[in-house]
Image (cartoon, helix red, strand yellow):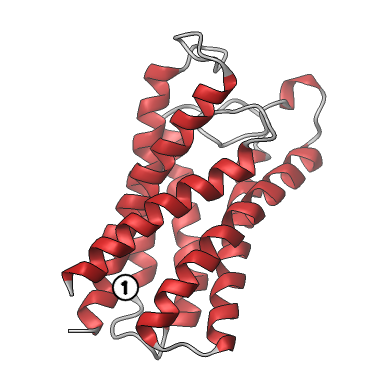
Amino acid sequence: MKSFQTRWIIINIALFAVGIGLGAAHYPIDFDGLRCPTYEVGNTLANCFQFGALLGAISGLIIGIGQGVFLGRQLGWNRNQFLGWVAATTVAFSLGHALGDSAPVPQLLPWSALGMGLLSGFMLGGLQWLILRGTVDNASQWLWQSVTGFGIGLGLVGVAAIFLLDNNRNSVFGWNGLVDLLIFVTLEGLLVGGIWAALTGRIVFRSKV
């Protein structure tokens, strides 16, 4: 059953990187991902909330479908369970990004990233738990493992951003936008997706032993 855990981690690293990459590719990259990148040049709070909701919905839909297909095969889900998982993941990511991106003032790294990670993990874990309960032993642990995984993962991304960005949140190395985007999605995939999957996968793994 170790192969399940390994595949779950690899799949989520890829899903988080691709989902966040596609969601952010059309917009200037802000490494911490916690506020509307152009808030200072005229965007309102509502504009930034809508931007975050759209970005999160794109990411959550991709991640939710990928996770749902994998877990559905492992747990024997029916169509409604699969659709419920996709909906829960999409809503959680959309709401998390909307709340984070609509912050009206610059945020302090890495504490802002850690705080957003804890909040996002709570929303994602809680909504996904609604689908998992009754099908996985100790499903309630999914919530707390999600909080821990997102908190650690986004906190580490925040630490990395301190070294990669200047005071204006531009690359300290003068890289172009594409390179910044690739670095950003790689960090999100490895640190957030990988750590979150390593913790949550243990719950499903134990239930299958």
Question: Which percent across, then down, holds residue 201?
Answer: 29, 67
Total count of labels: 1
Q: Residue at x 53, y 65 (%)?
A: 64
Question: Which percent across, then down, holds residue 154?
Answer: 41, 42
Quadrant for the C terminus in the image: bottom left
| Residue situated in front as seen by the camera: 117 or 69 | 69
Residue type (three-letter) at the residue carrying disc 1: Gln
Question: Which percent across, then down, holds residue 86?
Answer: 57, 71
Q: Residue at x 40, y 91 (%)?
A: 134
Q: Is residue 148 visible?
A: no
Which element is circle 1 on? helix
**Label 1 environment density (alpha carbons within 10 Å; few <14, some 14–19, many ≥20):** some
Q: Give above or below for 20 relative to 198.
A: above
| Residue situated in front as seen by the camera: 148 or 8 | 8
Q: Residue at x 50, y 14 (%)?
A: 171
Asked which quadrant contains residue 143, the reply is: bottom left
Asked which quadrant contains residue 10, the reply is: bottom left
Question: Which percent across, then down, holds residue 82?
Answer: 54, 80
Q: Give above or below for 15 relative to 152.
A: below
Left or right of 135: which side holds 123? right
Quadrant for the N terminus in the image: bottom left
Q: Give above or below for 153 relative to 8.
A: above
| Residue situated in front as seen by the camera: 62 or 158 | 62
Q: Which residue is mark 1?
A: 141
Q: Residue at x 61, y 63 (%)?
A: 90
